[in-house]
Amino acid sequence: MRIIELAGSPWQLGRQHGQMLSPEIRFMHRVLLAYLVKVGLVVGVWPIYALLFFLTRRFRPFISPRLLEEMKGIAAGAQVRLFTILLFNVLDDIANNLPRCSGLAAGGRRTREGAYLAGRNLDYPLFIDDLINLQTLFVMEPHRGLPFASLAWPGYIGVCTGLNKAGVAVSQFSAMCRDVSFRGTPAALRFRQGLEAARSVSRMTEFLLAQKGTIGNNLLLVSASEAQVLELSASHGAVRSPEAGLITVTNHYQSAAMAPWHGRPPRRPPFCSLAPYYFSEAYSRSRDARLRELAGQKILQPEDIQAILADEHIANPGTVASVVFSPGERTLWVAQGQKAPVSQGPFQKITLW
């Protein structure tokens, strides 16, 4: 498991990041360009690249100066264009995400110590082998804000799977949504800002609801004593709470308040090797039902959650990351499988701080 520790000002965080991972960042850029060349065989790659450049620039006014400075540092350290780093960090917002992720949290009478545990699979439709090979745990100590850890990739500064030093864990799950916008903070950057600011689940919920977003997301927020799913669209949000100590989450809204913003499943991207069923609402609902079935009435331990995430009806050929959290102990178990689904491989225990 590659672990990168970074500390300092935004520029210093970025510069260290870019210098340490320059070959990997350049490789990711080549992989993305190669994909765009394949997609652009009909209309040409440059019109597509120009469109991405235009769309990426639309997000720039909504990115905090501090995070933009960090991205500039990465670009300088890796000796790539700033646009490349910006694109890495807003690509999911442009594509409106591609849902297949699964997660759950259990606490109270559902765990041995009563403290909440959580688990998540992160699934992706493209670049699957590369994302597995390049997976990196960033342990960040910014000059301002709480220290945090983020399981991500070279060049990526947002948080889709993370834990802060106060013991708040976050997992991002895209949601089928018709309320989307380019006039908001890109999702993973928004969630990073929340993780740096919040010492509790309730505080993070307040922070995120006060910001305008971009796309649909279900956010699993967990501490030792609290768990919530925050269902978000670009301009709306609702909180869903555990039932009898258990909460599950996939890629559709489950609260009545978000029903008006429920959208259609995304289209399967070009040259994706995954079957169309993996992009359907039926698949999201079947995984949620399966999570509940597997959890049953058991008292869950970390290894039980690992087994749930490895289940053949939960994991899929796009599962590139899988993590179990014990927020109260500041501990992660990160799947080390070499092929998707990685959750069917061994898990490495990592205790932070």
Image (cartoon, grey):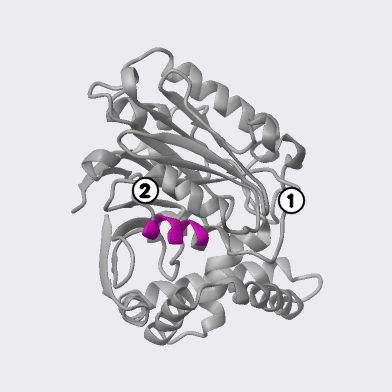
Q: In this view of the protein, which residue sits in the foreground, 145 or 41? A: 145
* Quarter in which the N terminus is drawn: bottom left
Residue placed under numbered mark 1 in the picture? 179
Counting other residues with Cα less than 10 Å from the Cα at mark 1, is it few (<14), some (14-19), or many (20 or more)?
some
Residue placed under numbered mark 2 in the picture? 338
Q: Position of residue 14 (x, y in %)?
A: 37, 77
The residue at the far right in this view is 43
* Quarter in which the C terminus is drawn: bottom left
Q: Which residues are magenta?
A: 190-197
Q: Main secondary structure of the magenta part?
A: helix
Identify the element where label 2 is drawn.
Answer: loop
Q: Is residue 156 left or right of residue 352?
A: right
Q: Residue at x 48, y 56 (%)?
A: 191
Q: Residue at x 74, y 50 (%)?
A: 179
Counting other residues with Cα less than 10 Å from the Cα at mark 2, is it few (<14), some (14-19), or many (20 or more)?
some
Q: Is residue 275 left or right of residue 297?
A: right
The kind of residue on which mark 2 rests is Gln
Q: In this view of the protein, which residue sits in the foreground, 59 or 49? A: 59
The dot on residue 168 is: none
Residue 52 is one of the magenta-drawn residues:
no
